[in-house]
Amino acid sequence: MSQDIISTRDLMRSLPPVLGRFPSIARGLYYYLAKDNEKDLNLSKLIDRNARKYPNRPAILCEDLTVTWQEFDAWSNRVAHYLKDQGLVKGDSIAVLLENRPELLAVVAGAAKIGVACAMLNTSQKGKVLIHSINLIEPKMFVVGEELLEQAEGVRSDIKLDHANPMLYLADANTQNVFGEAPEGYTNMAIEVSRFPSTTPELTVPVLMGDTAVYLYTSGTTGLPKAAPGSHRKFVRAYGGFGMLSLNMKPEDVLYCTLPLYHGTALLVCWGSVLAGGSAIALRRKFSARAFWDDVRRYQATTFGYVGELCRYLLNQPASAQDRNHPLTKMIGNGLRPSIWKEFKERFGIETVAELYASSEGNIGFSNFFNMDNTVGFSTAPYRLVKFHDGTRDPIRNEKGFLEEVEKGEPGLLLGEITKKWAFEGYTQKEATEKSILRDGFKKGDSWFNTGDVLREIGFRHLQFVDRMGDTFRWKGENVSTNEVENIIDGSGMVEEAIVYGVEIPHTNGKAGMVTLVPQKANGDFDADKLLAYLQENLPAYAVPVFIRVTQAIEKTGTFKYRKVDIQKLGYSLERPEDEVYAWLPKTSAYTKVTPELIADIEAGGVRF
């Protein structure tokens, strides 16, 4: 892991551009620090403001469609009137299963205007997982896009919906003009919405900042998804913290978003930033590395929303004279690895990397406000970095039963203090919420949100992401950080993507390192020994992966997270004949190709690791 340190000189260099936009900073702080959950400030108010100030400027760009702020506000008002007419009231919820298209934002905004929360369903879910996600919320109605109708039909008889006519259908088209024909058992939502007025609905009970606006789901990489309520306050904070403080968004800005809108980075961070500037969001259904720069030029995008893997995919594209022929200067997201941070900026001419750290359910967030390299930035929220038991989410308590902070610069488990101002909204399942809370941490009566992530301070209260708990393992009596090994492998120039984890070997203690990787050169012979020589030069022996799985693709969730549990279960087996598996056997200087005979020998304890 990079040992970056932020110096006084670094900080001083970043100040002039920050001080030059003081009015934006002052406004941003007002929204970011807003703490009164009873305040009449909500997503609807943010949209209404843009409709008044920038009525004819684009709010949404999608393929050949442009929706202005005035049109978007009117559209969402009609949605609000329709839902209200259907008997929905503040505190109710609806489930939403739509791909990235304007209809999704119109439904979210319309529901928010009357205090109805949208459960943002992962579009890759189906069957039992989708049933589980919907029934966690028990929504009144279910909005289904034509593009995902088959998934909805597969669970329809097993989900709990509390309404006389709960199934709503939206054709896979611009439903402001093309209504399509709803299948049997569905109400054509576009037709119904078109019959209602475009004026702001009148409410007897106001929608407050602390009310739930959306439900966002964990990715389910380690079990069934959990639903985290997201209040209007989270939109307001993203509006001020990311849109104003980090990105300084303006009406002429366009943010290109290929991240799924059921994910917090897209919905809260990216759209929240767009709302702050009166800017436009340009939507694409799914990320395409080949189409990325053509889309950026087409929409004249100045900003894009990312997760680290998208940046890697773009870097893996062949270098081109067109790499800087675009208007993109800013990016916001999370997971950009230090190993590719500067290379990405320099190759594509990016000026601002607004890296952030946050979670849908958490009460703490960090933002790279000063545009430093290799950091998630700083936070105004109260937090501590504490000592923890290796390979777990469990902090260490001293003889008095209290937690202990790590030394400055040392990796520590990040905790966010739970206060009235920094509330922890948690999950819909009380037991899941309670598991994430640490009580009596530093004094009797205090409480802390356990992020489960390890970070380190690198100067001036700026943190750097180190590892996600559970992504460390112990081998040969030493702790191995999967993130650190992945960063080293990234630097080899031999792989497109790699994921590191620990696997159990019979008759040994701890877990041996293993990497599943996609080679840089597709359909060519992978030189495992060349990689071994590189790893031995750059890692201690105990951190060099004992096993390598060479594959053509690594399965991910819809939010670009690796399905690490499935990969770990596969281990060094030969269940997938299309993969090649190698082992670094004791007292050898090269990787050995794994065969059924070798596996039998390892399992029997014949190989003494």
Image: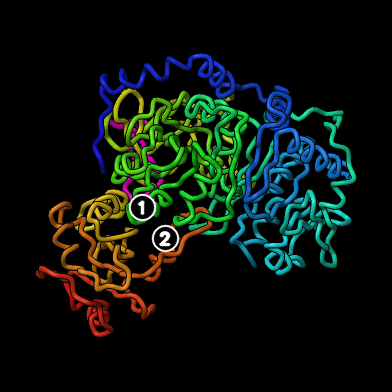
Q: Is residue 389 magenta?
A: yes
Q: Is residue 38 magenta?
A: no
Seen at 45% across and 35% down, the residue is 330
Residue 269 position (above or below residue 99) = above
Q: CA distance from mark 1 to mark 2?
A: 9 Å
Which mark is on residue 564? 2
Seen at 32% across and 36% down, the residue is 374
The residue indicated by pointer 1 is 471
44 vs 140, nearest the viewer: 44
Seen at 20% across and 54% down, the residue is 477
402 vs 49, nearest the viewer: 49
Magenta part of the protein: which range? Answer: 386-407
Q: Quadrant of the C terminus?
A: bottom left
Q: Is residue 339 left or right of residue 175?
A: left
Residue 551 position (above or below residue 425) = below
Q: Are marks 1 and 2 in contact (CB under 8 Å)?
A: yes
Residue 168: image location, x then y, percent: 80, 56
